[in-house]
Amino acid sequence: MEDIEAQHIIEAALFMSSRPLSLSELGKLIGVAAPGFVSQRVRAVQDAYNGKGGAVEIAEEDGKFYMRVRQQYVPFVKSFASAAEISPHALKTLAYVAKNEGVTKHALFLKLGGGIYDDVNELVERGFVTTKRAGRTKSVSTTAKFKAYFGQQ
């Protein structure tokens, strides 16, 4: 596969994905297992977006990549963000997590009910929250993607 073709596939994957993608996931798409090569292709896509100076950029968080609107343009377009991407109950859970950063799943369960387990899974899948072991439960925190998406950076 040509380098430019690999870059186009990576760009398309980042555009279509609702969550950050790892180098190994992107490598599988282009049929390359070498993380160095995949990283070079991702960096080339990033450079192309940076060179355009447009409203969209390729961001990296914890070694995973995603496409987002540049921070200076978020205030102008955030009303177009589709709340339908997140189910209404998960959106309620996300709001509670954002207000109570590091809240445990147990505390969420006590406050919002049993549906929070599906909500947290949905929010983790979409890259808006992460979970971390906290004793016998897990704590839930928002991610940089959440902050960028909702204009809090």
Image: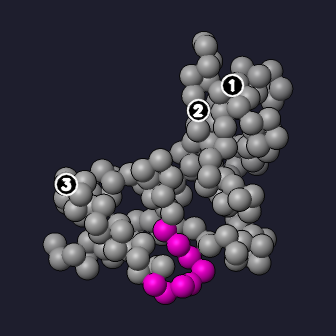
User: Does the residue at mark 3 contact the one at mark 1 (Cβ under 8 Å)?
Assistant: no
Q: Position of residue 58 (x, y in %)?
A: 49, 68
Could you give the CA–CA distance between mark 2 and mark 1, rounded to whole angstroms? 9 Å
Residue drawn at x 67%, y 70% is 71
Against 127, residue 113 (above or below) is: above
**Quadrant in which the C terminus is drawn:** bottom right
Q: Quadrant of residue 137?
A: top right
Task: Identify the amino acid type marked 1.
Answer: Lys
Q: Which residue is mark 2?
A: 131
Q: Earlier in the sequence, mark 2 or mark 1?
A: 1
Q: Earlier in the sequence, mark 3 or mark 1?
A: 3
Q: Which residue is mark 3?
A: 34
Could you give the CA–CA distance between mark 3 and mark 2, rounded to whole angstroms? 29 Å
Against 109, residue 146 (above or below) is: below
The answer to if 20 sits in the magenta stretch is no
Against 100, residue 127 (above or below) is: below
Q: Quadrant of residue 118?
A: top right
Q: Position of residue 127 (x, y in %)?
A: 57, 49
Task: Judge left or right: residue 132 versus residue 83.
Answer: left
User: Does the residue at mark 2 contact the one at mark 1 (Cβ under 8 Å)?
Assistant: yes
Task: Identify the amino acid type marked 2.
Answer: Thr
Q: Position of residue 11 (x, y in %)?
A: 40, 72
**Circle 2 or circle 1, nearest the eye:** 2
Q: Position of residue 135 (x, y in %)?
A: 61, 13
From the viewer's side, name the closer residue of 23 and 110: 23
Q: Which residue is mark 1?
A: 105
- State which region is magenta: 51-58
- Label 2, secondary structure: give it: strand
**In the image, farthest residue toward the bottom:** 52
Task: Identify the amino acid type marked 3.
Answer: Ala
Q: Earlier in the sequence, mark 3 or mark 2?
A: 3
